[in-house]
Amino acid sequence: MVSYRYLFDRMVHEEWRLHTELFGGKRFATFPLFVAFVAAGTATFFALGDAAADTLLGGLHLVVALLGLQIGTVGLVGRDALEDLLGDTTLLLYAARTLPVSFRRLMIAFVFKDVLYYAVLFILPLAVGVAPLAYSGLVPWTTVPLVFVTAGGMFTLGVSLSLFLVGVYTRSRLAALAVTGALVAGLVLRGATLVSVTPYQLVSRVTPGAVAGSLLLPVVLTAAGIALFEFDRRTPARTARDRFRFLHARLGDLDRQGALSKSLLDVGRSSGGLWKVVFSQGLVFGVLAVLLAYLPEVVPVRPQPGLTIATILALGTFTTYNWLCQFDDEQFYLRYPVSLPTVFRAKLLGFALLALPVGLAFLALGGVVFGSATALVGVLVFPPLALYVFGVTAYVAGLEPNELLFDTPTFALFTLAMMAVLLPLVILAIAYPLYPPLQAGGAAVAIGLLAGGVGAGLYTRAGTRWERKALAGTE
């Protein structure tokens, strides 16, 4: 039997080889430095605004926990890899079909590799970014190494929780929905109690419950997720219903060349199906609802809920774009009589069909929770802001956003573009109660519309830009 140590070493070497060959060793090696720079700049910005250090640290831990939840969906990708749904891509996890090594052993090594890999790539730079808070006297210097430990713990907890939910999902979609609902309900009703047994509690106070939870919860959830994970090794049926023809006929003139039908079916046929979109946006909404309802604010005024939720949900639509492109690259379409501008048009329509209804539904739910008056601004801002996220991502990352955003210049451009719009909206959300609603709301809508216009402009240029690059790569 292949040892865990050997699998871990091979996976780390392959991860490093992939990214250094894609971007060059120096460009990829500077990625953590850029993350640290952004984290330090953000901390300095809020420190100069007399922000509460506890809230800034809470936001950092929230970010890494959400990142862990996203990374933990490797279980879904792993299932697709085992079922050979990734097109020309073959992951090491597929070795469970061809070599004498179990899928569970591969998954354990894969999760352990991801936790350590991202701890160096993201968590350590984010912890270093806390240094300006220590320099300004908001926190002691001992907080910097402590944050690395606690943020790493929150990331691991996010990975293990996501893996557990994926394991439950492979057994029963209804059970996964019930568990997710129970988790969200627990966060809303007993958020403080749940947080007290996570690594975040250790930032302010070390308690037996926090220590036990930090050590045991990730192990138990990971073990349960891998044990529950079910994969049908039987040879799949050779025939299936022609869903492409059915969907293509229903879409009519919207999809003359079939690129939209293909994109929607790519999301639907992969593990998790279309429910991935609902789950990811619902998770963001649930966390935001808890933050807005229970946790301390950055300033003594609670941010406007509708605008806050709309802004973060729009940023979260990046995952929908990623899923629409998960089986694609520019070279793939050069084999067929279809232009890349047509492909990007299909991705935009698919994005609108998947991301916008789900986001607007959660904004409506936010109106029920926080009041309908707060949701109106969010409803007006969310669609153009989502278009901005789509346009920026399409222009800078093309059809391979999950890979190209590890390229430091690309990630830097993407981050700066997001911050240019998100920071003003976050500030407006905080200042909203201090100004007449029409004045603050009008400013937010104006920023959203301007961003949407920029996103539309970038989208129209993305297809020709990446087609030109793809054709140059074949010469």
Image (tube, rainbow, N blue to C red):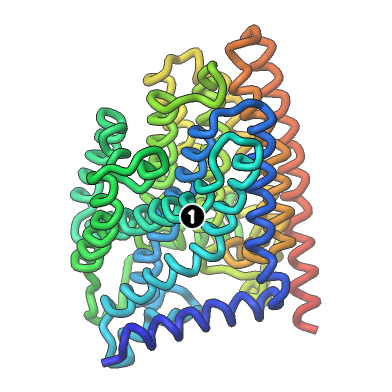
Q: Quadrant of residue 19?
A: bottom right
Q: Residue at x 64, y 17 (%)?
A: 441
Q: How many marks?
A: 1
When the figure is inspected, residue 447 is found, relative to residue 263, above or below; the finding is above
Q: Viewed as shown, does residue 184 lie left or right of 291? A: left
- Which SS class for mark 1? helix
In front of the other: 175 or 100: 100
In the picture as drawn, the residue positioned furthest to the top comes out as 436
- Quarter-wise, where is residue 186 in the image? top left
Where residue 370 appears, as percent x and y from the top left, is: 42, 18
For the residue pair 87 and 308, the one nearer the viewer reads as: 308
Side of 253 where 227 appears, left or right:
left
Residue tagged 1: 148
Q: Quadrant of the C terminus?
A: bottom right
Above or below, comparing residue 77 to residue 424 in the picture:
below
**Residue drawn 69% across and 30% down?**
48
Q: Is residue 240 visible?
A: yes
Dot 1: few (<14), some (14–19), or many (≥20) neighbours within 10 Å?
Answer: many
x then y, percent, for residue 254: 59, 49
Q: Image height check: is 345 above or below 85?
A: above
- Tell me the kind of residue under disc 1: Phe
**Going 65% across and 78% down the picture, which residue do you hit?**
20
Q: Quadrant of the N terminus?
A: bottom left
At x 76%, y 40%, the residue is 454
| Viewer-nearest residue: 196 or 463 | 196
Where residue 90 sits: x, y (%)?
Answer: 46, 81
The answer to which quarter of the image holds residue 43 is top right
